[in-house]
Image (spheres, rainbow, N blue to C red):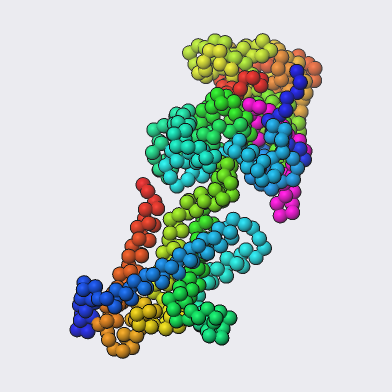
Amino acid sequence: MDMILDGILKALCLLVTLDAEVRDITLLSLAVSSSATLVSLVVGVTVATAVALTEFPGKRLLISLINTGMGLPPVVVGLFVSIMLWRNGPFGFLGILYTPLAMVIAQALIATPIVTGVSLAALQHLPKDLRLQILALGATRRQMVWILMKEARLPLLAAAMAGFGGVISEVGASIMVGGNIKGYTRVLTTATVMETGRGNFEVAIALSVILLLVAFAVNACLTWIQQRRRPR
Amino acid sequence: MRPETPLLEVSGLRVYRGGVKVLEIPRLTLQDREVKALIGPNGAGKSTLLLALARLLPVTGRVLFHGRETENGTAALAYRRRSAMVFQEPLLFDTTVFHNVATGLKLRGMKGRDIRRRVGETLERFGISHLADRHARALSGGEAQRVSLARAFAVQPEIIFLDEPFSSLDPPTREGLTADLGRILAETGTAAVMATHDRIEALRLADTLLVMRQGNIVQEGPPQEVMNRPADAFVASFVGMETIISGEVEAVEEGTVTIATAGGYRLEAVGNRRLGERVMCCVRPEHVTLSPAPPASASARNRLGGRVRRIEPLGFVHRVAVDAGFPISAYVTTPALQELSLKEGSFVWVSFKASAVLVFPVETTPALR
């Protein structure tokens, strides 16, 4: 019991004193995961819009592939990105393995199917005549897409948060392509794994508390948005 | 007078869905200020025709607006910006009433002050100025459909397409909206094509009635003509074989009105209407009595002499069409028919109670009548 209490006290101490190393790790976590989420939003919302607004053979298959992708195991993504970026791999010449950029790429690959799947569901959930109604009001195709996105803005925001939540808590891919290099690619999850392995439970608990706080903040926003969805 | 270019002219219009032809309209025209009502059973193609006319569906054939093609991208957009459509569901956007009504104007690049003025005028016209700041999700069904209509009329369309806009509303709400729509169509001179299930709604608003079945138009004409002289058994069964007479309110007494008909006849009806109001009178055949001599009963306030035009057997009863200065139909049982010894061409007295006459105001543009 003492160990847990000590851990929480230590965590508070690290938080209150703004320990430089913990601060840098937290900031890197936020930076990597937000960048990855941003990339996945651009790709995911574009793909979701295209799929939602067009009819083509194999559409159902594509949707089920996207939905399957929502549960993509991070270690598989980590392995794939490692191979791609390996010194003599197809993109080895870039020399970006074990850099934050590699982590962003891996996390974006994890978040994109999540964002795409949730966005697609949000867009498909809009009334089927809404698109025609917007066009009938004199919209160009681009204006129509913009209004549809505004109509689905809250579920789209939920998609962003689901994507972010998925990658901030992910450890497998980050450790594989980032390498947990101190002061360079060490993030909250990889640091927690390492400190636990070393038996430094206080530090591990402190890092976990911070991770939980970040996850809690994301979920609180999500819940708030979902509740706001229904006025009256 | 030289014939003017119709507002909308359609030829060889076809719509395919999954390789199956679901709509075929060889020819259809809509004149300036004209209001057409589309009636027909579910699946007759009413919505498809509206979407095709509004250029919201891929079609083959030609749709000419003011005599010009509406096919290629920019022409189609220009056409969509001079027309509007209202669906059965209000389909309001997740914002305030004001911003909903402003949407079409913003899409056309109108600026702030002009938008505020136009939205203000439109809201007032529809009697919903007080709802301007209300969120669209906090409206009743009738209010929401009013906002949807206002949003469509805000862009001052030349044509408006209406797809059963009132069918999910309760009768009193519907009544109010129908009256307002009729008034606004007449005021603004907007041409309209409206799909409806409600024959009365069609009668009140439309200059032309269009009966559809299985993707085809089976009859088109003024409502009275279609209802009095249905082209075939399908139209007859769908529109009902009602007698429809147009006229004007000549006298108003407590609870009853006297209507002078176009042919110079006078009908008494129960109801509250204004003096001088243009109305349509409907009499159901089951409320019409035929007799060899003028009826003695004082309750049958309307009595007219006429000649039998046609006798049609309909199972247990016969439908007797009489020309009493206007066409009127009655249902007569077989024994009664024998007793009256009715034959085509024979003289007969037609009578019906004042309460059997349904009176509806006519709210369409008088110019077309």
The N terminus of chain A, quarter of image: bottom left
Left or right of A184 in this view: B232:
right
Instruction: Please tell me whether the stretch drawn in magenta is mainly helix, strand or loop.
Output: strand
Residue in the picture at 69% in, 21% down: B328
Q: Is A232 included in the stretch rendered in magenta?
A: no
Q: Is residue B117 above or below residue B1?
A: below
| Image coords of residue B205 (percent x, y) | 60, 27
Q: Is residue B292 visible?
A: no
Residue in the picture at 77% in, 40% down: B12
Q: Is residue B344 visible?
A: yes
The residue segment tinted magenta is B13-38
Where, by quadrant of the figure, is residue B358 drawn?
top right
| Image coords of residue B69 (percent x, y) | 72, 38
Q: Is residue A207 above or below residue B338?
A: below
Determine the residue located farthest toward the bottom in the rendered image: A198
| Image coords of residue A53 (percent x, y) | 59, 55
Q: Is B36 included in the stretch rendered in magenta?
A: yes
Report the number of numbered marks: 0
Residue in the picture at 32% in, 65% down: A217
Where, by quadrant of the figure, is residue B24 drawn?
top right
Which residue is at the front of the view, B278 or B323? B278
Which residue is at the front of the view, A203 or B52? A203
Residue in the picture at 54% in, 48% down: A143
| Image coords of residue B67 (percent x, y) | 72, 33
